[in-house]
Image: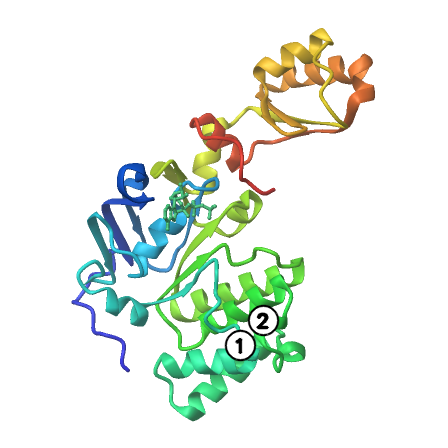
Amino acid sequence: MATPQPTPLGTATPCCSVRDLVKTYRVGRGANATEVRANAGISLEIRRGEVFGLLGPNGAGKSTLVRQLTGLLRPDSGSVEILGHDIVRHPDRAARLLAYLGQESTALDELTVHLAVETTARLRGLGTADARQATADVIDELALGPIASRPLAKLSGGQRRLACFGAALVGARPLLVLDEPTTGMDPIARRAVWSAVDRRRAADGTTVLLVTHNVIEAETVLDRVAVVDEGRIIACDTPGGLKAMVDGDVRLDLVWREEAPTDLPVVAELSRRAAVNGRRWTVRTDPDDARELVAQVTGGPAFAALDDFSLSTPSLEDVYLLLGGRHEGFEK
Ligand SMILES: Nc1ncnc2c1ncn2[C@@H]1O[C@H](COP(=O)(O)OP(=O)(O)OP(=O)(O)O)[C@@H](O)[C@H]1O
């Protein structure tokens, strides 16, 4: 199965181009049916060879977007072009242009890690000997050897995710679409994932589309990031470019032991300014004001109710909050 020949493209042609994508789910039946507009007109371009991220809270519409890019879900309207191919009209071509690691990968569950990777290689058109070699290489590269003969269903969440990532890598595709690939992984496995991505980028110019909740990961691995909220892209730039929007500010995080003592005037005043996420309160402000707030909170009776506090430079999460996004659903 050969990769389809894309139409001739200039080097400036994007790897992936999305225009005005709209997707509405219908939930329920009859008079009780409701509609959820998961993508409300999304346009973006992913350049060749870049690591492009989609960052946003739960339910923002990221997975819906990538499932349309991968040809698994048909948009209501709009276009998706990958390396010159119209994926809305020809969804069957997506499998030969991209490798997709979805959030749930149950299809391979009954197979051992070794067989899952080798079967994927065969399905992607590699001959027996090549598939065997590609499998051995990926198992070695991701240090999957000790679990290679175990069924995926019997592995821990992180081990399983790494094995599925390994399967996504075989039979190299020009675009890798990874939906939260490192969820549940320990730091060693995470590093193995990013090293493997880097190697493919350097060797083959592989383009990567990454869905993530993890702002630290987003800041370290992405070339550009689109911030998604309620089915729309509310900003798109390099992580540095986005963070420049909140330059000069610092963030103060306060974590209360239990309920915040809002009967204290200083805490009551803070509650009006803070983004509240459970016991964690976040205030973004200028450095002088932040110092003053720290002095007030730590110098009075509120201190006894504090579990932890920190002052830091802003992250992509602060950009997101500045842009009006909701607070829940980010990992740090
Ligand atoms: N199959 C479906 N049927 C109905 N509604 C759906 C379906 N899949 C997703 N949705 C809804 O569409 C919206 C976008 O969901 P989506 O899974 O794309 O978000 P997401 O940004 O990937 O979220 P998460 O970070 O939690 O994975 C949500 O409101 C969700 O409840």
The reply, left or right, for residue 152 in relation to residue 69 is right
- Identify the residue at image location x=83%, y=20%: 304
> Whole-percent x and y of residue 164?
51, 69
Q: Compared with residue 106, is residue 3 higher up or lower down, i.e. above or below?
A: below
Name the residue located 42 percent from the left edge and 28 percent from the top edge.
Answer: 323
Q: Residue at x 64, y 79 (%)?
A: 145
Q: Which residue is mark 2?
A: 153
Badge number at residue 290: none
Mark 2: secondary structure: helix
Residue type beneath disc 2: Ala
Q: In what quadrant of the picture does the N terminus appear? A: bottom left
Residue 158 or residue 198, whichever sits in front: 158
Q: Earlier in the sequence, mark 2 or mark 1?
A: 1
In this orientation, which residue lies closer to the viewer: 103 or 248? 103
> Is 139 displayed left or right of 295 in the figure?
left
Asked which quadrant contains residue 93, the reply is bottom left
Q: Which mark is residue 110?
A: 1
What amino acid is labelled 1 in the image?
Glu
Q: Secondary structure at mark 1?
A: loop
Task: Determine contact: label 2, label 1, CB under 8 Å.
Answer: yes
